[in-house]
Image: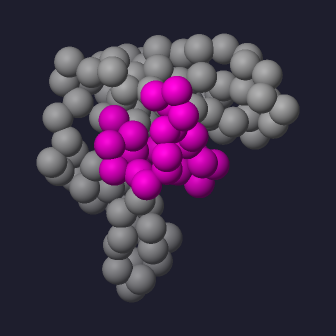
């Protein structure tokens, strides 16, 4: 099973605890001092909005991890975040970050495309 890009034993199936995923994401990533920006767009490429992700949240750390470790090629310093990844990151963030990321996570659950930039 792959969650947030990390492999977990198949024996765990879909029951991998959020704590295990958070531990993997935090392992080896220092997200402090980094700015994370999400840009949403339609399938046709029309930019809808730009969102800033609050530092110190799981969402922030997970997006830094995604940007750093994904093999997706950057375009204009942005990397496309795919539906499975954004959905998994959103689900964990909703449960551990509370209100600080609630509005962003609701948006990540839509079908629009998102690009992430870390500076």
Q: How many numbered dots are placed on residues in this image?
A: 0
Residue 9 image offset from top left, x and y in percent: 35, 80
Answer yes or no: is residue 86 visible.
no
| Quadrant position of the N terminus in the picture | bottom left
Residue 92 is drawn in which quadrant?
top left
Placement of 80 over or under 117, stated as above or below = below
Placement of 90 over or under 116, stated as above or below = below
Residue 65 among magenta residues: yes
Display coloring: one colour
Residue that appears at 15% across and 48% down: 28
Residue 63 image offset from top left, x and y in percent: 40, 36
Seen as rendered, the residue at the extreme front is 76
Pick whichever, 23 or 51, lies toward us.
Answer: 51
Residue 96 image offset from top left, x and y in percent: 37, 36
Seen as rendered, the residue at the extreme right is 44
Residue that appears at 36% across and 63% down: 6
Residue that appears at 77% across and 29% down: 45
Placement of 62 over or under 9, stated as above or below = above
Magenta stretch bounds: 64-92
Seen as rendered, the residue at the extreme bottom is 11
Residue that appears at 72% across and 26% down: 41
Residue 7 among magenta residues: no
Answer yes or no: is residue 30 visible.
yes
Pick whichever, 69 or 111, lies toward us.
Answer: 69
User: Left or right of 104: which side holds 33?
Assistant: left
Residue 24 is drawn in which quadrant?
bottom left
| Quadrant position of the C terminus in the picture | top left
Residue 60 image offset from top left, x and y in percent: 36, 29
Residue 12 is drawn in which quadrant?
bottom left
Pick whichever, 116 or 83, lies toward us.
Answer: 116
């Amino acid at each position: 099973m792959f969650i947030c890009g990390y492999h977990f034993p198949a024996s765990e199936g879909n029951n991998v605890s959020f704590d295990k995923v958070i531990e993997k994401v935090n392992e080896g990533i220092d997200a402090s001092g980094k700015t994370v920006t999400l840009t949403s767009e339609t399938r046709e490429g029309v930019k809808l909005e730009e969102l800033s992700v609050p530092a110190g949240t799981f969402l922030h750390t997970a997006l830094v991890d995604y940007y750093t470790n994904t093999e997706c090629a950057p375009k204009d310093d942005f990397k496309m975040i795919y539906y499975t990844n954004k959905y998994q990151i959103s689900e964990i963030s909703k449960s551990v970050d509370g209100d600080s990321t609630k509005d962003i996570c609701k948006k990540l659950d839509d079908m629009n495309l998102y690009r992430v930039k870390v500076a």
